[in-house]
Amino acid sequence: MTEDNDKQKEIICPLCGHNFKKEDSKKSCEGCALNKNNCGLIRCPNCGYEFPEIDDTGLMDRIKRIFNSDNKENDQGGK
């Protein structure tokens, strides 16, 4: 993903549900001392909640694999 596409990525705050772009989050970090070191947190411009940036696609793939492997084990055990 290019940097421009990354800035345009829509993010949903897990606390208040506000939709915003990643670049909007960076604007609220301007006064923070950790801003220069790229702390890896996203800050909601609506409520100020900070949370780690994660790749939702990768996370969902891992969750699906866990549940799919559990289902296969349960199917085999019932036969």
Image (cartoon, rainbow, N blue to C red):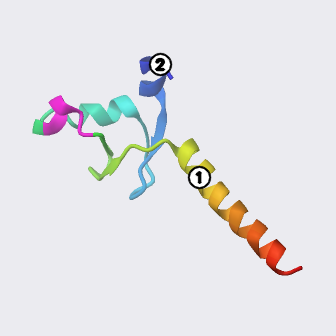
Expressed as whole percent of the image width and height from the top left, the position of residue 5 reads 49, 22
Q: Quadrant of residue 37?
A: top left
Q: Which residue is at a point 33% across and 50% down the rendered structure image?
A: 51
Closest to the observer, 1 or 15: 1
Q: Quadrant of the C terminus?
A: bottom right
Q: Earlier in the sequence, mark 1 or mark 2?
A: 2
Q: Which residue is at a point 28% across and 32% down the rendered structure image?
A: 26
Expressed as whole percent of the image width and height from the top left, the position of residue 69 reads 70, 63
Residue segment shown in magenta: 34-39
Q: Which residue is at a point 32% across and 36% down the rendered structure image?
A: 25
Q: Is residue 63 left or right of residue 72?
A: left
Q: Is residue 32 left or right of residue 63?
A: left
Q: Main secondary structure of the magenta part?
A: helix
Tag 1: amino acid: Arg
Among all residues in the image, which is located at the extreme bottom?
78
Q: Which residue is mark 1?
A: 62
Closest to the observer, 2 or 27: 2
The dot on residue 2 is: 2
Q: Is residue 70 left or right of residue 7?
A: right
Q: In this figure, what is the number of numbered marks?
A: 2
